[in-house]
Image (spheres, grey):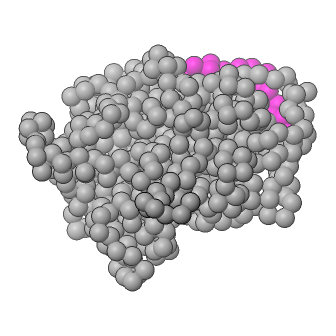
Amino acid sequence: MLGIPTATQVLVIGGGPGGSTAATLLAREGFAVTLLEQSFFPRYHIGESLLPSILQIMDLLGAREKMERYGFQRKQGAYLHWGREQWGLNFGELAGEHTYAFQVIRSEFDQMLLEHAASQEVKVFQGVEVRGLTFDGDRPRRAQWRQKAVRASSQDSNNHHDPGDHPSNGASGAASGEIAFDFVIDASGRSGLLATRYLRNRRYHTVFQNIAIWSYYKNADRLATGRAGDIAVGSVPNGWLWAIPLHDDTMSVGLVIHKDALAAKKPLSQGEILAQAIDEAPLIRRILRDAEQVDGIHTETDYSYTSERFSGPGYFMVGDAACFLDPLLSSGVHLATFSAMLAAASIITLTRDEISEEEAATYYEKSYRQAYLRFLVFLSAFYDKSRGKESYFLEAQRLTQQDVDVQNLNAAFLKLITGLKDLSDARSDAHHLVLEEMSKRIDQNLSFRKDKEALAALEGEELAAARANARFFSSVEGLFALNEEDAIDGLYVTTTPGLRLARVQVLQPAGAAL
């Protein structure tokens, strides 16, 4: 037997970054947490480029030192060749204390987080699939699990390009059982146990219907962007390419292309389509000029979706289990760990009777959806930049009424955009108004970043404008929930003295009755 308990306070389904983060944060606050992961780590995963917000998450997890000393490729920014524009982006150059992130081999990064969770008293079980949930009304109460048989022969666990599972614990054969819980965190990734099997509330976007095709290369020019750790991004007709340098001297290179454009390229193979796109992107072509492909072709499709609801009685859906967009802005791990922090803070606070369960679920719902929608608008506006009128993205990648509710859009940007009026009075034009504002901010950001010498010489009103622009994008790409001024319904996340939700303190006017 595996020793899986028959009951736990919190059950976490999935051991990726979202699941490991939520489990660790809860365990560090004294909760009994059981995590069931159906794979054996290390296991292959795409999503290798991280944002600077990962540093704050690592601090909360008590894993910053592990991250720093592991040896992952440090990432200080990006270099983009988008349409007619080329520019370098340095983290923190406009404002902000987080000036770097990391490029990671996900099999190693995810295993590091899972092992850290176990070190924090999380009961971690790998090779265990959650087969179903039992509900009490609308509230999930028990999970049925089954141990996967361990393969007799182990493959090289250091091969981060191998998509197979690797045994890491447990005995061969199979076992099954049931576990009761007070709360469940669904971090099951794209499979989305709650969303796809029970709630049936996942919607695929009518925009961003893209397909990713990628492989790995050695002997790439890691200095073609001017700095070894930068991610390189190059646009091509109807899509774009990434080139991510990894610490094992390989380069992850992939194409994101709309499914209709991909279909039009048949009978070319996916490998031929990737090679053709590389040849069409001068920056990526230069990086791979003397490189050798050392892996096969990988693909992902239908990965842009959202759930109509992210939380409910006794459950929280984090990371890809709730929603996913597009890899352009490196939002995958960010949203997974950010939502994990929100879920953990919500559970901690409601179990201490400081807020109601309904308040906790509502706060989580609104906070995670705001983070997701800000990325969605940023992505949509960015896709429209520097592209010709004939570009598919110019219209097809715009937000639609079916993808984004006006009320949610208004909530996501009302505090962020100074002077933004209630969009409910402009329903027919609301999406355009927000996209237009985001486009202006992108143009301003690009203008500041293009000339590094001019940026360094800014002072007075121009310096204030650059910092204001940086704060805007920090509210898109950062952990905005940690700021009292960004409170939602009077609640925000605080980390002192411990992780929890706090209420904004309303100052009583002088002389007011107590």
Measured as percent of width and height from the top left, residue 485 is found at 41, 53
Membership of 268 in magenta stretch: no
Evaluate whether residue 123 shows in this view: yes
Question: Which residue: 38% across, 62% down?
Answer: 415
- The residue nearer to you, when weighing 279 against 325, is 325
Image quadrant for the C terminus? bottom right
- The residue nearer to you, when weighing 304 against 134, is 134
Evaluate whether residue 328 shows in this view: no
Q: Could you tell whether 398 is left or right of 458 in the image? A: right
Question: Which residue: 77% across, 35% down?
Answer: 32
Q: Could you tell whether 148 is left or right of 237 in the image? A: right
Looking at the image, the residue that sits furthest to the front is: 511
Magenta segment boundaries in residue numbering: 146-165
Image quadrant for the N terminus? top right
Compared to 275, does 417 lie above or below?
Answer: below
Membership of 158 in magenta stretch: yes
Q: Could you tell whether 324 is left or right of 353 in the image? A: left
Q: Could you tell whether 276 is left or right of 490 in the image? A: left
The image quarter in which residue 172 lies: top right
Which secondary structure class fits the magenta region best?
loop
Measured as percent of width and height from the top left, residue 70 is found at 49, 18
Measured as percent of width and height from the top left, residue 58 is found at 51, 30
The image quarter in which residue 170 lies: top right
Question: Which residue: 39% across, 76% down?
Answer: 422
Compared to 7, does 395 lie above or below?
Answer: below
- The residue nearer to you, when weighing 231 against 25, is 25
Measured as percent of width and height from the top left, residue 483 is found at 44, 48
Q: How many marks?
A: 0
Question: Which residue: 43% across, 80% down?
Answer: 424
